[in-house]
Amino acid sequence: MANRIEGRVLRRGDYRYESLRREACWHSGVPDRHPEVIVLANNEDDVVGAVKLAKEEGLRIAVRSGGHSWSGSHLRDGTLLIDLSNLRHVTVDTETMTGAAQPGIKGSELNSMLAERNLFFPTGHCTGVTIGGYLLQGGFAWAGRDYGPACMSVTGIDAVTAEGERVHADESRNTDLLWAARGAGPGFFAVVTRFHVKLYPRKRITMNSGYFWPASAARDVYGFVHEIGRQTPAEINLMCNRDPLTNDEPLISLNATAFTDTEEEAREQLSVFESCPARAQVLTTRLNELTDTGALSRLGTDPHYDETKRYLADNMWTHVSFDSLWPNFEAMLQSWPPAPSHMVLYNWAGCEGQPERPPMAFSVEDELYYGLYAAWSDPAEDQRYTDWVTEHMRAWEPYSSGIQLADENLINRPCRFVTDENLRRLDDLRATWDPDGLFVSWLGRPEPAVNASVIDPDG
Ligand SMILES: Cc1cc2nc3c(=O)[nH]c(=O)nc-3n(C[C@H](O)[C@H](O)[C@H](O)COP(=O)(O)OP(=O)(O)OC[C@H]3O[C@@H](n4cnc5c(N)ncnc54)[C@H](O)[C@@H]3O)c2cc1C
């Protein structure tokens, strides 16, 4: 019964239901999907209460931590949405270099707390993203190449199961649940109420160099990044977007960041970018600037994410030479959508000294990561930009080894996001932990057969 729940319980048609549904999606392209009930949990007991309420009412369950899923995978028809945005408690043990954090805390907030103690956790590139969905889908972080996907630094979870039971999973108890929580993303089949994590010493130096080119240099710059991306220890963020610097034509900006213990080492890492064949065509540079991840997010990445716009994202992992990608990219440059639409390319796997991957659901990654994001204002243009993103990413499918659930577009372009073996294991584990299919799964994937008393969320 709802009176087991301290937090707000809103039903379709209730005052504030619609504003809460809209707030549950970070951008203005809120999907036309409506949960029957939204429970704004105040605490872990509320999560237990919400699971029981869903079972009583024959509703499936969707979960939201911060609502930064591009596709709004937590907004589903016919569900009870458990909103965890008020679960924000964090503890840090400086001595053991461990912490515990609830899913509604933002990565940037966590990192500010850690910075005060000279500690570090691999959090995402934008200020607003909460850790709940981020950690479950993998977690592509600042300095992430040094630590692997952030879910590798999750040592345990507290969760509420489909039975409404509170459980703990770590490397000795309920190990299969921890295995799944490290990468299942929106296909996870329980509610995580707390992540137990390991923390790292904070590197002393964060140094960044930026180079900015007109689109005419694109082929040389991307070719260079494909060649050196694997070896360089520096983190590359190569972006293409319309910008005033090029009179609103596409601008290519290369931001390289070194995370080191000495300035000398950082300068050495960043020196390789001076050898880019397009160096002479550069419009402007900012070289060897000392900074921190907070400033990199605020000044570099956040401005591309405007919550008043509608967004569609898609992505791919690859390791091919840029020559294979160029024809499609050349066509994209001719039709680039308005700012702040953009494409990012990060270097990722393959660099010497990267940590070995433990057994975990997260299992598809590659040397380079492309994320493509269209942003627009007019709902009448939804189809146009959905097609633009989806079709251009589809053109690159032959060169891709799969996608990351971070920026997934599964509803329009289903794609491999874990290995086939891991997908089978996730399905088996779901059948064990959630036999009635109470929790919705990846958006666009046909839901497995469920107990007849449970309503189909998408139909
Ligand atoms: C502006 C922006 C920047 C981003 N930058 C990065 C980045 O740098 N690196 C990166 O890796 N990703 C990035 N992402 C992607 C982001 O990490 C994912 O969309 C992530 O799912 C968002 O986390 P969230 O807590 O807001 O999830 P939500 O949107 O709240 O939830 C997404 C899904 O995750 C599941 N879920 C969420 N919380 C829980 C929980 N506690 N228990 C069980 N299931 C849960 C649900 O199935 C839900 O459908 C970015 C996204 C945006 C919009």
Image (tube, grey):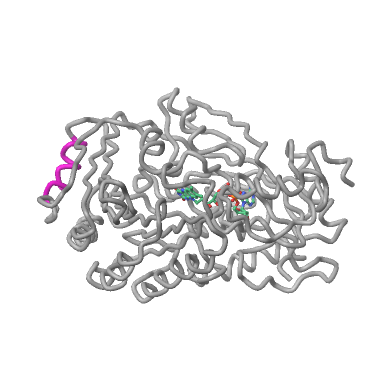
- Tell which of 318 and 127 is nearer to you: 127
289 in relation to 190, above or below: above
Looking at the rendered image, the quarter that the C terminus falls into is: bottom right
Picture quarter containing residue 166?
Answer: top right
- Label tally: 0
> Is residue 228 located in the magenta-colored stretch of the structure?
no
How far across and how far down the image is residue 442, in percent?
Answer: 61, 64
Q: Which residues are magenta?
A: 265-275
Q: Nearest the camera: 361 or 176?
A: 361
Q: Who's the residue at 36% across and 59% down the image?
A: 369
Q: Position of residue 4 (x, y in %)?
A: 86, 41
Identify the residue at image location x=24%, y=42%. 210
- On the rendered structure, is 394 left or right of 274? right
Eyeballing the image, is 176 above or below 47? below
Q: Position of residue 280 (x, y in %)?
A: 10, 50
Q: Is residue 244 left or right of residue 387?
A: left
Task: Give me the residue at 62% from left, 55% from top.
Answer: 30
Q: Left or right of 152: which side holds 448?
A: right
Is 266 colored magenta in this rendering? yes
Residue at (69% x, 61% y) in the render? 33
Residue 31, image x, y percentages: 63, 59
**Magenta segment main secondary structure:** helix
Q: Quadrant of residue 446?
A: bottom right
